[in-house]
Amino acid sequence: MTTATDIASDLQLPSLPEVILRALDACHAGQSYRDISRIVSADTALVARLLALTSSALYHGSASSSSIEQALLRLGTRRFQTLLLTSALRQLMLEIGGNEWQQLRDFWRHSLTTALAAKTLATLTRYPDPDEAFLLGMIHNIGELIAIKTPCQERKQQLLSQQSDIAARLVSSWGLGPMAADAMRYQHALPGQLRDADHLVKVISLSTRLALSDATGIGAAATLFGLQEDLTRELNLKIGEEVASVADSLGVPLEEEYDASESKRRLNNRLIEHTVVRTALSLPTATPENLTGLVSEATGSLALVTGLPVLCFSHTGEDLVLRSGSCRHLPELCINPTSGRSALTTAFRTGQAALMVPSEPTVLDQQLMSLLGAPSLLAIPVRMNETPVGVYVLGVDEHSLSATRNLAELFVRELTDALVSASTDTLGSEQQMAHERLRRQVHEVSNPLTIIRQYLFQLRSRLDDASVQSDLNIIQEELDRAGNLLLQISQHTVDTEGNDTDLNTELSSLSRILQDSLFHDVDRALHLNLCAEDAHIQAQASSVRQVVLNLVRNAAESFENRPGTVTLRTTAPLFQNQRRWVELQISDTGPGIPDGLQRHLFEPVQSTKGDGHSGLGLSIVKQLIDDMEGIIACHTGPEGTTFRILLPAASYTYDKTD
């Protein structure tokens, strides 16, 4: 008999494909954690997976996450994107039928309604953490979600009857605390029994009743919190409108029949694109000599994506040779493709996908069916620049054929595109030398620009003619434009270094460019105060440069026509949360950040710096630091602004004995 203690804390549960797609789009677009958390919070399966990961040993038993945004920050963008992709992959493996999709949509609506009701009640009754209430509202009935993907009817009933205990056990395993677990455990207690219960327990219990929009919920609101009937009905109405708005933004129909086939197809395609890209990135450089080997190495990815047995034949000389496959024992098999009508040889000769002819299978067809353990075959040719490279052969049946053909053809198309791109975009030693020369040339060109600026400064003080001053302004603007172009060129040169960067060395190098481009005026200064200790960090130099350039450029532009100083300071080592960090402080003596912008500091906003500025600088900085698993904080006032950045030290290793 299944009990609550049998449920693993790291669950593999179904999500609405629309939510995963929207979250992937948000990650790809570089949206803020706040935006991404709004999407993730609308799906119980993603919330559960996120909580399970961030409470696991991977995070060294650190404090639990009481909100979805907090859990996302702890996980980081790249790890979360991996979580989304694995969730999408598992979605493919779950056998969910039409009726179960309807159940999943209805479950989703009820969970989101409960979560929004919990947050509204928490705010209305002054519970100190409304986000915690929302999170618990999303997972209060997780046992029902587990039941949806469970084929055994008897076990389904067991799960449904133990929902409260299942949710309580999972909440405890995720480290959300005893009161959160009690809120799950006593969610169905009678209102009269909850009058003197913990605040959070009452909020969750009432929100589950309000989500049902019946008279018992209205009565419970009066019993537990003294809420009048009119107010409770108004709350229900507003929550219903908000749920409808979220559903509309995701493309989830609430009233008509729910058909997930189109969204699932799009999610499958997205999964293949990411899988192929990752496969291509993990392969060695593509050259004409090793293309067949790379196609062979991608066999496992194709099997993973389709969930079907796969064989890979490479074009070697005049023959097709069996190179790899998902079968346990592969024979030595060499085929002459110039004749015969098997699916394999037909696909190779025509360059088109070929299905085995069921009525007249050739001997080779039958041999391959035996190897794959399948009733039929689908052969997909691989061609690069019209040159045949090989053929994938998949074991299919009549039920999987249509979907498999679309998936496999898309996989092969994306794989060949990725390999062609890899073979043409490789950076050889001569290109590396060229980029190094470019860096030196940028620095050399900056020197005469600095001299010209100094002469302009002297001319301005000597000439009183307004028309001449206007001409000098034009020259100054064009020089500044040239300096900014040089700065962009130096910023976009190709990086060849790895993920270990000496922060002090990088800042010293950057300061020379910044001095020439942004601090050429005599009343502006850039100071370096670099620590003597080891300042190597776990980050790419290109990311560090982009962060520093954005923040220093913002500081310099805030001075406008006033004098000012920017200081770059490093400190190492610094210990926080059982980790070793290197600290970077970027301080300026500018006027500070306006009050209206401080509340949305790291969100894309309209810039205050005039035309030519997108206002995206700080949101990009935040995203880059999140990707480096760093921390950024800001202090600003009339005396200036300081950004404090903590970056993981390259020498950091976690000591479990700490």
Image: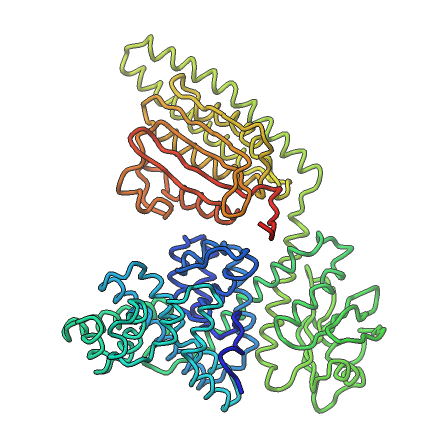
Q: Is residue 323 left or right of residue 580?
A: right
**Of residues 221 and 259, the one drawn nearer to the viewer in this rendering:** 221
- Residue at left offset 58%, top offset 80%: 402
**Of residues 290 and 225, the one drawn nearer to the viewer in this rendering:** 225
Q: Residue 345, relative to residue 511: is it above or below?
A: below
- Residue at left offset 66%, top offset 82%: 396
The answer to whether residue 20 of the structure is visible from this angle is yes
Q: Is residue 300 left or right of residue 150?
A: right
- Residue at left offset 43%, top offset 76%: 142
**Of residues 387 and 3, the one drawn nearer to the viewer in this rendering:** 3
* Residue 511 at x, y percent in the picture: 51, 27
Q: Determine the image quadrant of residue 349.
A: bottom right
Q: Determine the image quadrant of residue 360.
A: bottom right
* Residue 501 at x, y percent in the picture: 60, 38
* Residue 600 at x, y percent in the picture: 32, 47
Q: Residue 307, relative to residue 51: is it above or below?
A: below
Name of the residue lying farthest toward the top: 462
Q: How is the image coloured?
A: rainbow
